[in-house]
Image: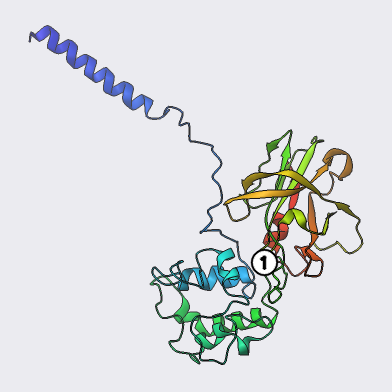
Amino acid sequence: MSMKYGIVSLIGLTLLLFWGCEQSSDPPVNPFDGQVVNQDTVKLEIIKPEPTSFAGIYQNILRPTCANIGCHDGTFEPDYRTMESSYNTLVYQVPIKNDGNYTFRVEPYSPQTSVLMARLNNLITPAMPIQVEPDSDWPAKKAQYISNIQTWISNGAPDISGNIRQFNSPVPELIGAGATENDVWMMRSDFTGPIIMPETATGVRLYFAFHHDNMMPADFQYNRIAFSSDVNGFDSVSDFPLQILSSPRVERGFYGDLVSYTHYIDINPEADFDPLQAQWFFRVYVQDDQNPLMEIPNDNGIYYIKDYMSFRWAE
């Protein structure tokens, strides 16, 4: 190769390297940037949950300490992979290991007859937890954590909405709430925060998804909704009927998985809600054929779920 062509090649290589360095400060558009990431069903994070609420019990104790590989990771019950599976495999569930003195893993209002407490206090061997993960703070906070679980059970072992499960008669559970404007699913703040509502929104449809072990949510006997600008101010507000979809709408739910939305109400936010009130909360009232009327969430529910069941005006 001649000196002439060698110099040209060297110059070309230098320009190519210079161009590449210049371009590194302005990379090409990534088509995955800006996409909405759906809530992880296992790592659902609730910021600073009340320690004696089930959200606090799950997030502080069950998930980091008990959901060990080959243990309560779904290998056998109770299943502590998610908050939902944890609750549903604990309360009024018959234990596998029992000395004959206990009926349920968790019996609401009765820590002294709950196997969970007996295992934690070494009244039934082996004591729980059998194995502690290296990053668990159980050894340092064991006494406080056991006290928190006992308080939760003594308070009726409520779910995150504040409802108390009935024996052999599961209550309806809210598993999703969402909204559309012009049939487009609306955004939330931080995945499970309030629905972001434009002040000019007129045609909005709120959707709700429920789970029930024994009947279809579309067959509930009572379906209503109420709105309030006060997070717990629902005692004196009017309620309105929820409609039933002829075909459920499938979208992501509270825990991040796909769920069937069966209930809805059409609202006109611009006309019917005061824009000077920064946030509006809503509660649903449903009833099956076996339980009293359920208010979801009720005053005893954790704030996180109340915040989820709300919308705030877009800034």
Corner quadrant of residue 305: bottom right
Left or right: where does residue 274 sit relative to residue 85? right
Q: Residues within 10 Å of mark 1 (few under 14, many from 20)?
A: many
270 or 23: nearer the viewer: 270
Q: Secondary structure at mark 1?
A: loop
257 or 281: nearer the viewer: 257
Coloration mode: rainbow
Relative to 101, say whether 308 is above or below.
above
Counting from the top left corner in percent of width and height, residue 152 is at 65, 78
Measuring 54% from the left and 38% from the top, which residue is drawn there? 35
Counting from the top left corner in percent of width and height, residue 71 is at 42, 72
Relative to 67, say whether 184 is above or below.
above
Relative to 143, say whether 175 is above or below.
above
Quarter containing the N terminus = top left
Left or right: where does residue 71 sit relative to residue 116? left
Residue 15 appears in the figure: yes
Which residue lies under the disc numbered 1?
160
Amino acid on which the number 1 mark rests in the picture: Ile
22 or 203: nearer the viewer: 203
Relative to 85, say whether 278 is above or below.
above
Left or right: where does residue 157 sit relative to residue 25? right
Counting from the top left corner in percent of width and height, residue 227 is at 84, 53
Quarter containing the C terminus = top right
Corner quadrant of residue 94: bottom right
Measuring 53% from the left and 85% from the top, which residue is drawn there? 143
Counting from the top left corner in percent of width and height, residue 188 is at 66, 46
Residue 315 appears in the figure: no
Corner quadrant of residue 69: bottom left
Measuring 71% from the left and 61% from the top, which residue is drawn there? 215
